Amino acid sequence: MLNYVEAMNEVNGPSQELLDMVNDLRTRGGLGAASDGSDIVVPPIALSGLTGKFG
């Protein structure tokens, strides 16, 4: 479900329907619901030091 929410948010922008879906996931994970999505923060990903080699 999270992949769907992320994709739809990217394509269409935020909506109440998507926020409700995120809140369902947050509730299942014991995080509690977000009232307006303002506390849903994606931390930045550090790309420095990546070599592109795996294993």
Image (cartoon, rainbow, N blue to C red):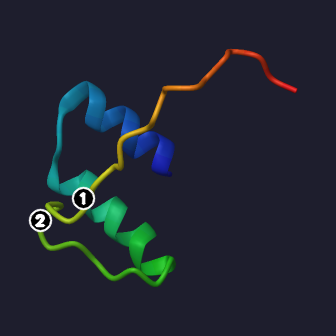
Q: Residue at x 36, y 41 (%)?
A: 44
Q: Residue at x 39, y 33 (%)?
A: 7
Q: Nearer the viewer, residue 52 or 35?
A: 52
Give whichever of discs 1 and 2 has the lower sequence position.
1
> Which SS class for mark 1?
helix
Q: Is residue 28 left or right of residue 21?
A: right
Q: Is residue 25 left or right of residue 37?
A: right
Q: Residue at x 20, y 30 (%)?
A: 12
Q: Residue at x 77, y 17 (%)?
A: 53
Residue 1 percent across, percent down from the top left = 50, 51
> Which SS class for mark 2?
loop
Q: Nearer the viewer, residue 45 or 25?
A: 45
Which residue occupies the extreme top position in the image?
A: 52
Give the residue pinned by disc 1. 19
**What's the residue type where badge 1 is placed?**
Leu
Give the residue pinned by disc 2. 36
Q: Is residue 15 left or right of residue 40?
A: left
Residue 54 percent across, percent down from the top left = 80, 23
Real-space CA distance between mark 1 and mark 2, rounded to the nearest whole angstrom: 8 Å
Q: Nearer the viewer, residue 43 or 30?
A: 43
**What's the residue type where badge 2 is placed?**
Asp
**Label 2 near label 1: C-beta < 8 Å?**
yes
Q: Quadrant of residue 36?
A: bottom left
Residue 43 percent across, percent down from the top left = 35, 49
